[in-house]
Image (tube, rainbow, N blue to C red):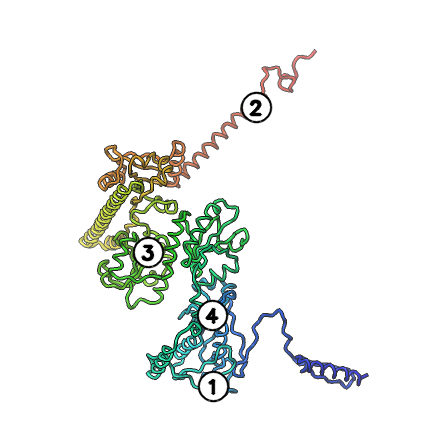
Amino acid sequence: MRTLLYSILSFAAFRFALAGSPVEAATISTSIAGDVKIQTATAAKPSDSLDDTPPETIFNGQTVPPMKDLSGVTFDEEISKGYWLVEFFSPFCGHCMAFKPTWQTLYEFYYTSKPLPGAQKNSESLNSFSRYYNFKFAKLDCIAYRDTCSAKEIESFPSIVLFKDGTEVKKVKGARDLSELSTWVEETLESIRPGSRPKEGVTLPKVGAHEIDPASKPEISEAKDKDPAGGAAAASKHNALASQSISPSTLPKAELTKAKTTPNPTGVSVPLTAEKFQKAVTNTRDPWFVKFYAPWCHHCQAMGPNWSQMAREMQGKLNVGEVNCDIEKRLCKDARVKGYPTLLFFRGGERVEYNGLRGIGDLIDFSNKAVDIGSGVVDVDFDSFKEMEETEEVIFLYFYDHATTSEDFQALERLTLSLIGHAKLVKTKDPRLSTRFKISTWPRLMVSRDGKPTYYTALAPKDMRDFRKVLNWMKSVWLPIVPELTSSNAREIMDGKLVVLGILSRDRSDEFISAKREIKNAALEWIDKQTQMFQLERQELRDAKQLRIEEAEDRNDQRALRAAKSIRINMDEIERKGVGFAWVDGVFWERWIRTTYGIDVKDGERVIINDEDNRKYWDITINGDPIRPSRTSILETLSKVVASPPKISPKSTTGTIEHFFFQIRNACGSHPWLALGVLIGFLASVSVWGKSRIRRGRSFGSNTGGFFQLDGKEGLLGGVGANGKVD
């Protein structure tokens, strides 16, 4: 039996060895007592078909472990020490998949490289490169960890970022070839360990190769600015290429691919699924104007022809798409679509919503402005800026000099998307413009509205790069001095201030142009007067502070002196009603103007001064005449309206009952504690009155035992007369 058992075990071991199984390392031993024991050495488990862990690779005969896959949860902790070169990618990005072999070859080449010349192979471990330079390669999936990539401001895939001790050092967007990446790595390694890298450079393998001869020498460097021999080599190579006839077949594949990409080649609105949206919109820098709709939505159906016509007009200029939210519900939820139709403009992971009118002209106008941002922030000089002022009402101008950093320009580029349809953003280093606008520090941001400058007051570098802070300031000043009132900007124009509103008609072109000019002149003059009053008021406060300081010094009163010096002059704390100017198309908004203000533009151009917060308006001068669109009429009436109290009686834009409740609401909003006290007093009064009524009712019923009195004849009810006359 023992011989038979040995034969069976030997046959099994032979079968496993032929199959190449890890169990071939098993050893068989027998015990003296006749018991058979099978001892199996530790062996690797067969690979599971469901395990997607990348396998180890071999480069130059050395085993290379899989590249580190970082987790978004522990990302900052993992890269907090040493140098990390991280690829931010998307598994759905075609550019990322094409770049993957290059990135893997770069990692394998440097992981197996010998940092110390002459080091013996058997004297170093597999991670000696990482230990010597403290330099590691890694990657992060931005689909799985979207929040982490957003926090690192990753706008396109792939993006490669170099971190030092958790701090970003340099960022490169898009795929790069092996030579360019190696140059970047070599410069970083040389800065870590000066003198450790070969002066002639390194010999790089071909993408996808698994070995390279360590003794091979690199070709002569073509860095002309560093090596004269390299410059000669580059010149000879350039001449050789120039002598050849260039045909499409000789162009690099990447250039051919780039030349074929034309936005909206067919002039139609492309239906987008979730997968196609990810590939075409999210993972690229291409601009897209996308409509999110539902087939049953009447507003979507009404806008359909205009949307299709806009797509035809934008052929070859702007990508136009549409998403059916009945089918792509998850995509619409991720896009935070709350109503139909929703129109969003996308570029490089960022978006802006279009809230304007949906006419064909409005859509095309917005689309043309969206196309303009593709060229980035345009650099202008004195003459080109002057020409631009003739056509643009609002221009944001960014002043820079030779010391302005790439981080400053990157922060500037982020602003372009939010300015579509509002204002133009340009940059300059022309000294003539700096002299005109009295710029003495760089970088500096200002806005020119009809030639009148307004400056962004924050000057610190962190404030200039603070996207949200700069954008909030831009929103406060991006309206023209006299904008047109539309449905998209009505709240922005009318709320929180008095508005001089010109009711004009485009049908009478001469009167229309003249009226707009008069309103603008009145606005500019009013702004100048307010600026002078502001400066005078601030100077008066400063003079009052100085008088207190001098008085305390004369009395040698140190306490009063400290109190006087601690006075802060803050003009923002002084409450003053702002005044804005605008005009509205009286023909297009004829019904609203007639029902709200009782004015018909057919009777001629008119001006009203509106106080939206209090639902009041003024439409006559101090003499009782209608306010006309003239500088004199507007300024004389405006000064009487802003007086406290107003010298002209206002009219109400609401009815009597609505006005009564509106006044109550305003009173409660202006004096919340007083309103709360009145409410508590009212409730207490009602409670006391109710309790007194209950007590009086109980007292009335206690005399008879009930609520009914029967004049002494209630004995049948068990009352007082129950023991009355008896036979």
Q: Are marks 1 and 2 in contact (CB under 8 Å)?
A: no
Discs 4/3, front: 3
The answer to whether residue 542 is left or right of residue 279 is: left
Badge 2: residue crowd in 10 Å (few <14, some 14–19, many ≥20): few
Which secondary structure, mark 1? loop
Badge 1: residue crowd in 10 Å (few <14, some 14–19, many ≥20): few
The residue that disc 1 covers is: 214
Q: Which amino acid type corresponds to the residue marked 2 in the rendered image? A: Ser
Spatial CA distance of label 2 from label 4 is: 91 Å
The residue that disc 4 covers is: 87
Tell me the quadrant of the picture where the C terminus can be found. top right
Q: Is residue 724 above or below residue 87?
A: above
The residue that disc 3 covers is: 424
Badge 4: residue crowd in 10 Å (few <14, some 14–19, many ≥20): many
Q: Earlier in the sequence, mark 3 or mark 2?
A: 3
Snapshot quadrant of residue 517: top left
Q: Are marks 2 and 4 in contact (CB under 8 Å)?
A: no
Spatial CA distance of label 1 from label 4 is: 27 Å
Spatial CA distance of label 3 from label 2 is: 85 Å
Q: Earlier in the sequence, mark 4 or mark 3?
A: 4
The answer to whether residue 548 is left or right of residue 44 is: left
Discs 1/4, front: 1
Spatial CA distance of label 4 from label 3 is: 34 Å
Q: Are marks 3 and 1 in contact (CB under 8 Å)?
A: no
- Residue 702: numbered disc: 2
Q: Earlier in the sequence, mark 3 or mark 1?
A: 1
Which secondary structure, mark 2? loop
Residue at figure coordinates x 41%, y 69% from the top left:
171
Spatial CA distance of label 3 from label 1 is: 56 Å
